[in-house]
Image: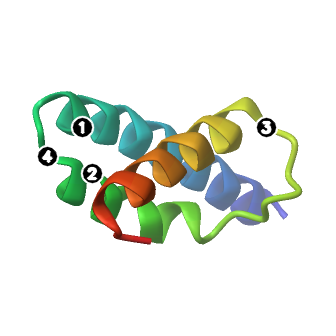
Amino acid sequence: MRLRQRGKAVLFFRLRASTSLAELWAETNRQVAAAELLSPVYAKFDDALPCASVARACQLRQDKAARTGVA
């Protein structure tokens, strides 16, 4: 049971770190790299999960996809 909880915590940390790095890259005109970094991590989450970190990643991912065409 603890391993499952620890795995979820690691995944959330990975999402927050990826989101922060993707935001930084997007500010330095590296939108494609930002979208490619964030997409696989975000894909592990359910859109219905009510969490600020997931919502922030979703918004950033949608913004980058709209600008670059990378899903």
Separation of residues labelled 4 and 1 (CA atoms): 5 Å
Identify which residue, 14 or 40, lies in the foreground: 40
- At label 2, which amino acid type do we have? Ala
Q: Is residue 54 above or below residue 33?
A: above
Residue 56 locus on image (x, y percent): 60, 35
- At label 1, which amino acid type do we have? Ala
Separation of residues labelled 2 and 3 (CA atoms): 21 Å
Q: Is residue 51 above or below residue 37?
A: above
Identify which residue, 65 or 46, lies in the foreground: 65
Label 4–label 2 contact, CB within 8 A: yes
Label 4–label 1 contact, CB within 8 A: yes
Relative horizontal placement of residue 58, taking residue 70 as reference (left or right): right
Q: What mark, if any, has residue 51 been given in the picture?
A: 3
Label 3–label 1 contact, CB within 8 A: no
Separation of residues labelled 3 and 1 (CA atoms): 22 Å
Separation of residues labelled 3 and 4 (CA atoms): 26 Å
Residue under pointer 4: 30
In which quadrant will I find the C terminus?
A: bottom left
Residue under pointer 1: 26
For disc 3, the neighbor class at 10 Å (few under 14, some 14 to 19, many from 20) is few
Label 1–label 2 contact, CB within 8 A: yes
Q: Secondary structure at mark 1?
A: helix
Identify which residue, 55 or 7, lies in the foreground: 55
Residue under pointer 2: 34
Residue 24 locus on image (x, y percent): 23, 29
Residue 41 locus on image (x, y percent): 48, 63
For disc 1, the neighbor class at 10 Å (few under 14, some 14 to 19, many from 20) is some
Identify which residue, 5 or 39, lies in the foreground: 39
Q: Residue at x 21, y 59 (%)?
A: 32
Q: Residue at x 35, y 68 (%)?
A: 69
Q: Earlier in the sequence, mark 3 or mark 1?
A: 1
Label 3–label 4 contact, CB within 8 A: no
